Image (cartoon, rainbow, N blue to C red):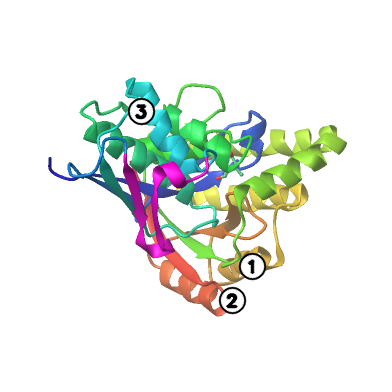
Amino acid sequence: MPAISATAPGKIILFGEHAVVYGRPAIAVPVHQVQARVMIQAEPRNPSGCIRILAQAVNLDVWLADLPREDPLVSAVRGTLTALGIEIAPACTIRISSSIPVAAGLGSGAAVSVATIRALSTFLGQAFTDEQVCSLAYEVEKIHHGTPSGIDNTVITYARPVYFVRGQPIEVFQVARPFTIVIGDTGIPSPTAQSVGDLRRRWQVDPTTYDTLFDAAGLIAQAARLAIERGTPEELGPLMDQNHALLQEMGVSSLELERLVAAARLAGAVGAKLSGGGQGGNMIALATPESADRITEGLMAAGAVRTIVTEVRN
Ligand code: MEV
């Protein structure tokens, strides 16, 4: 049997992170410059049911059976087998590699889940639809961070810009004019579970204040969608700045994020904001093809450990 492989891109949230957990709309886009890749090879000499997991970059070489039940990989594999009604899988090796920085708000966990579920269902002869992949990956996301909105697994599965409202069918939309985003990584690892959990505790103490912030972020996401569909992406700059101010008020920014956001603006970004869970991780800046290099240099000079220039298009 030939090896089967599947890939999944990284992602950024353009507008509406955190508020999306509370039912407000958000916009996310794939980042194709980084990706997770999963390759599955049959091992007919091993006994049935023996699944070996290899992820060289993190020195992982284990039998699936030896991983804890709550491990996201176990959940992705078991969820796939259960959905296919397979009790004992043919012996195989699952090789995982990824260029997506971990705990940086770029969707590394969701991308490994999506690629694993997609590759395994194909390997087992019953390739899942995007809808099936997305819903199984969502179950895995719940292990990564208790109350995910589902936006990460959705944008990564469909690998195109999405306008997302929790619990509602995915809405894809037209990017009338492509635009450039520079991503800057603070290098501070920040698991989404942590920032989502911290904010939930603050919301529980003072729901009125935080619901008002979430409402405002939702309105910004709506306005941003219109600008993207109209082909006036320059309007996204001020919307990004406003969204960032709301995220500051939600308490999910950090000194390092503030430094990079300020540096991007100083270097000519039309707007900038943190992206994803915050408290570390990545920020994004709206650029033009001409200003992207200058913004990249500004971000590196201000302490970014990595930058990615990406173009948003359908
Ligand atoms: C993480 O990429 C985005 C958050 O809104 C969490 C979520 O939607 O599940 C912070």
Q: Can residue 230 be seen at all in this image of the molecule?
A: no
Label 1 Cα crowd, 10 Å radius (few <14 / some 14-19 / many 20+): some
- Measuring 61% from the left and 55% from the top, which residue is drawn there? 274
Q: Which of the 4 image quarters holds residue 263?
A: bottom right
Q: Which residue is mark 2?
A: 302
Quadrant occupied by the N terminus? top left
Distance between the alpha carbons at the discs numbered 2 and 1: 9 Å
Task: Assign a secondary structure to mark 2.
Answer: loop
Confirm or deny contact between disc 2 and disc 1 (CB under 8 A): yes
Q: Which residue is mark 1?
A: 262
Distance between the alpha carbons at the discs numbered 1 and 3: 48 Å
Residue 132 in picture, x, y percent from top left: 37, 25
Q: Closer to the N terminus: mark 1 or mark 3?
A: 3
Judge from the rendering whether residue 32 lies leftward or rightward of residue 125; answer left or right: right
Q: Is residue 313 above or below residue 167?
A: below
Judge from the rendering whether residue 50 lies leftward or rightward of residue 304; answer left or right: left
Q: 174 and 121: which one is in front?
A: 121
Q: Which of the 4 image quarters holds residue 199?
A: top right
Q: 92 and 153: which one is in front?
A: 92
Residue 52 in picture, x, y percent from top left: 33, 48
Confirm or deny contact between disc 2 and disc 3 (CB under 8 A): no
Q: Which residue is mark 3?
A: 81
Region rendered in magenta: 50-68
Query: Which label lies toward us, 2 or 1?
Result: 2
Q: Is residue 223 above or below residue 309?
A: above
Residue 207 in picture, x, y percent from top left: 82, 33
Task: Assign a secondary structure to mark 1.
Answer: helix
Q: Closer to the N terminus: mark 2 or mark 1?
A: 1
263 drawn magenta = no
Q: Under 8 Å from ligand 1: the CB of mark 1?
A: no
Task: Assign a secondary structure to mark 3.
Answer: helix
